Image: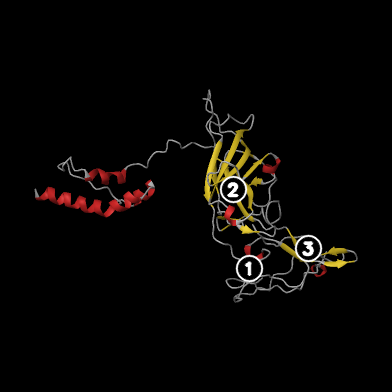
Amino acid sequence: MESRTLRLLVLFVLIGFHWSTVAESADPAGAQSACPSRPVVLSTGADPDTREAASLARCFLPPTFDDAAQLTPLLLSVTHAPQPVRSTDGRFHLAYELQLLNFGSFAANRPVAPTPPAALEVTEIALFGDGDPSPLLILAGDSLAERMQLVRLGISPPTVNFQPGQSGIVFLDVTFPDRRSIPKRIIHRVKVKAIAGTGDQPAIDQTDLEVAVDQRPVVVIGPFLRGGPWANFNGCCDFATPHRRVGRAVNGREFWPERFAIDVQKAVVVGDQLKVFRGDGSQVEDWFSTGEDILAVADGVVTRVVTTEPDNPIGTSPFPPVVSTGGGDGMIGSGSLM
């Protein structure tokens, strides 16, 4: 009798400790994490009518099955949550990247013999906000192709075709007239079809991904130049530039550092034309921006100054290609000035 009472007491303590967390969690993974790391083993002599054991047993059951889950042909991801930025056009922009990978797809019809996954063509990408059936944006045909490329170093030719195991990236820019119009969540709906001759049509031809919008205000900086006029080249957001579509692999992680980068150059009226350099512009000194002051955009402390790097010849990139020789590496307050 004492043995049975002790076993029940231990069970009640375990249930009281874990029940509140398990009951409040709607996520099966969250409920599982609230359970003991090792199952509690009840002896064969335990009372079979002890109903409390059932509530503890749920900790060790598989997650709830989702009958609506599908075996999709794509893996979709957004590495940087979209964050509203007000541009010079007065509109709020969500400028971000959607990545996809042709994971391989099951055939719509049972094949006579096993066949490899097909190469896929992305035919349409549609964006929806907060469950509204009216799309925020639809990309198809040329408008899709010109915003899509392979995930790799440099800017690759536009493409909507991906071999099995190949990754692509779509550069998105969704605009809104004011902050109140920006949805809290965006659903990305990507449709594909098999490229003729590469394999069977996929059983599932659509993949969805829902992403939360980062509603935090962006950091607003002060002007970093005085005087002028200054001409802005290669700015954001919805066209191919040397900045918007340049990615890097840094320390094993994907990095798109130039999403909002710009190139500003001082313009001077020469004759009846506005120019940014004198002569043929083949020398750094020919450019009117050379020697102009660059201002700190906020209060800070210069912690490091590097003066050993020579100027690059006009039209060439720094070498060797390492982070420290990249252009635009000026930072005041938490880094270096180069």
Q: Amino acid at mark 3?
A: Ile
Q: Position of residue 330 (x, y in %)?
A: 65, 69
Residue at the top extreme of this rendering = 112
Question: Label 2's element?
Answer: strand
Give whichever of discs 3 and 2 has the lower sequence position: 2
Q: Is residue 279 above or below residue 202?
A: below
Q: Amino acid at mark 1?
A: Ile
Q: Position of residue 171 (x, y in %)?
A: 64, 49
From the image, state whether disc 3 or disc 2 is nearer to you: 2
Q: What's the distance in space between the residues labelled 3 and 2, CA to CA?
A: 34 Å
Residue 280 in sight from this viewpoint: no
Q: What's the distance in space between the residues labelled 1 and 2, CA to CA?
A: 27 Å
Q: Is residue 47 above or below residue 305?
A: above
Identify the residue position indicated by label 1 in the image: 221
Contact (Cβ within 8 Å) of mark 1 with mark 3: no
- For the residue carrying disc 2, how many other residues have a C-alpha within 10 Å: few (<14), some (14-19), or many (20+)? some
Is 236 or 316 nearer to us in this picture? Answer: 236
Q: Position of residue 109 (x, y in %)?
A: 53, 25
**Dot label at residue 314:** 3
Q: What's the distance in space between the residues labelled 1 and 3, CA to CA?
A: 29 Å
**Dot label at residue 98:** 2
